[in-house]
Amino acid sequence: MASFPKRGLIPFVRDAILWNLSGGTGYQLFLCGLGVSMLLGLYAYLVQANLGLSVTNMSNIVSWGFYIANFTFLVGVAAAAVMLILPAYIFKDKDLHKVVIVGEGVAVGALVMCLMFIAVDLGNPLKAWHLIPGIGIFNWPSSLLTWDIIVLNGYLALNLLVPAYILYCQYNDRRPDERKYRPFVFVSIFWAFGIHLVTAFLYQGLPARAFWNNSLMGPRFLASAFAAGPALITMVLVIIRSATTFKIESRIFNKLRLIIVVSAIINLIMLFPRSSGSSISLPITVCLQYTSTSVSRDTMLWSRGFGRQ
């Protein structure tokens, strides 16, 4: 028979915040550094909100910069948490189950930064209300951007819900009921593939970005995410093992290393066909057609033949 919780939700949240803010001198200096970085970022955003996106030096020709590049990388980091969730919760891997909470925490931080990069890339903060269903002009399901907003927020909710429930049960010295959180684990596994595939479809469907028009974009995004994401999680685990008393065995790093190597090989296999001449000739032609209206006929013929040499 399930026991009643010893402590409520409010004490759990309060203690979690206090535990995250407590630590040694090095940790406090780290938190101060993060606070200063956040203040600098807030100041830069206020300057951008006042002067517009022109301060970023982006233009109609170069419309993707630091914001979208980091957004793409962090989406992959968030999706890579499934490489720990799948063996830990589904296949009952005891080693990865020990650090799966760390992977989910990294995913939550990555998703929060993803949404913030999207918000600052909008330029005018007043445009953000269009991203709220029922209030703004959401354009769902016709807009791929709205699909991206839905999958990112949904995956963020799932990665907050499951770890929060498990930690809350441990906070109250109770064993988590798998029947309550396992269905959400299955949903989050499929949702992890969705967040990166939707992002790939969003990039792939732009006519003005011909180099992204590739049928392998979605699988390549997943393969690169499953290589780069566990690599970043490995770095976090190395810091945790060296700076705390939390013991992380070497066999955990060996399993993560195997995931990284296999995913990187798959990504490279899909990269080679894209680098061949037959697939690069068409994007070069389309790019020249979009970016220049005064290119001579001889130059266009040369661009068409470039990929066949």
Image: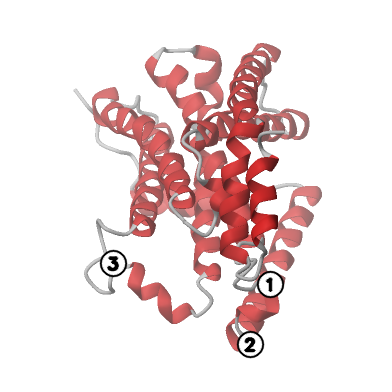
- Circle 3 sits on which residue? 138
Q: Work out whether mark 2 precedes mark 3 in sequence or the reverse, and give the earlier one.
A: 2
Q: Residue at x 25, y 30 (%)?
A: 180
Q: Residue at x 24, y 25 (%)?
A: 179
- The reply to whether discs 2 and 1 touch (Cβ–Cβ < 8 Å) is no
Mark 1 → mark 3, Cα distance in angstroms: 31 Å
In the picture, residue 279 is in which quadrant? top right
Using the image as rendered, state which of residue 74 and residue 100 is in the foreground. Answer: 74
Q: Position of residue 159 (x, y in %)?
A: 41, 41
Q: How is the image coloured?
A: secondary structure
Q: Which mark is residue 221?
A: none
Q: Position of residue 70 (x, y in %)?
A: 62, 53
- The reply to whether discs 1 and 3 touch (Cβ–Cβ < 8 Å) is no
Q: Amino acid at mark 3?
A: Phe
Mark 2 → mark 1, Cα distance in angstroms: 18 Å
- Circle 1 sits on which residue? 39
Q: Secondary structure at mark 3?
A: loop
- Circle 2 sits on which residue? 51
Q: Work out whether mark 1 precedes mark 3 in sequence or the reverse, and give the earlier one.
A: 1
Q: Position of residue 190 (x, y in %)?
A: 35, 31
Res 222 seen here: yes
Using the image as rendered, state which of residue 95 and residue 132 is in the foreground. Answer: 132
Quadrant containing the N terminus is top left
Using the image as rendered, state which of residue 283 and residue 26 is in the foreground. Answer: 283
Q: Secondary structure at mark 2?
A: helix
Q: Residue at x 41, y 12 (%)?
A: 91
